[in-house]
Amino acid sequence: MQKGPDFRRSVQGYALSNGDAEILLPLGSSFTDPGAVALAGTTNLPVTTTVQGIYAAYSGSAIDPTKGNRYDITYSAANSDGFIANASRTVYVAKTGDLVNSVEGLYTSTVVRNSVVSAQYADMQYVLIWKISDNTYGISDGIGGYYAIGRGYGDGYIAAGGTITANNIATNDFTFGSGCVVGTFGGGVKFSLLTVDAAAKTLTLKTSWDSGTAIYSFVITLKQVQL
């Protein structure tokens, strides 16, 4: 867990603070939002809470712990002069699949692009795989976070929308949806292979991205996080 910062806006005369900046929550667990506190001197200010689902569309004022997703929670408050301060936390909701009957899970990601190995793209946090229906799963980033996390470009560079259907996990028999697009860059990503090592708690996913000017191959090793 990461400890959240103390959100201070001294020029505005108040602080907005909260607890852990990141929470990993097993699917179906109860969740009580630790909230945030806003102060103008010693006076508590009203705090507005909003929630956005990043990988699966969702919005409201509370997360849904029954749906696998990354939830970004924002807290905001304003003092009497109208100055606004914000604090945030991220909650990952995931089911840890056994990799025999389910490939669901929260994973760290190590990506090799065009056979080039770099520490910059190792053990990136996180890629999420969640169940959509029956044996079909969604994956948060079809290139394993290479640009969004490894390059630090952010969510606008996720390859979202990829799907994986498990026909037989034990024999690594998977089929894939029509692929996905790399956010701001554009260009289609195609999935070609997924292999599962249940004992090692890892998945190996191979994809390729046609950027329009070049084709890049990705070998993505996903290490399951035990929640």
Image (spheres, grey):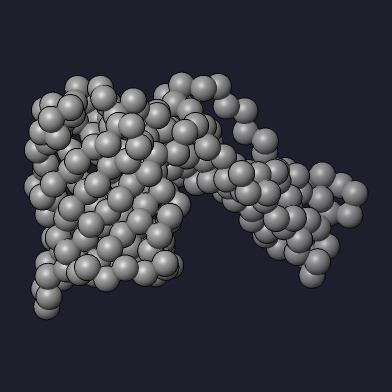
Residue 90 visible in the snapshot: yes
- Which residue does the image show at 27% across and 71% down from the upper left? 116
Q: Is residue 17 above or below residue 97?
A: below
The residue closer to the viewer here, 70 or 99, is 99
Q: Quadrant of the N terminus?
A: top right
Q: Is residue 131 left or right of residue 181?
A: right
Total labels: the figure holds: 0
Return the x and y of residue 185 as percentages of the image width and height.
24, 69
Residue drawn at the location 76% of the way across and 61% of the way down: 8
Which x, y percent locates residue 120?
42, 68
In this view, the residue in front, 1 or 84, is 1
Which of these two is toward me, 57 or 101? 101
Q: Depth check: 61 or 181 in front?
A: 181
**Can you say whether 128 is above or below 10 in the image?**
above
Q: Where is residue 70, by image quadrant?
A: top left
* Residue in the picture at 27% in, 63% down: 112
Which residue is situated farthest in the right direction here?
42
Taking the view exactly as shown, the residue that stands out farthest to the front is 199
Q: Is residue 128 left or right of residue 13?
A: left
- Quarter occupied by residue 132: top left
Furthest residue in direction bottom, as rendered: 213
Q: Position of residue 215 (x, y in %)?
A: 12, 70
Tell me which residue sits at (18%, 53%) in the image.
Answer: 206
Can residue 56 be seen at all in this image of the molecule? no
> Residue 140 at what x, y percent from top left?
31, 47
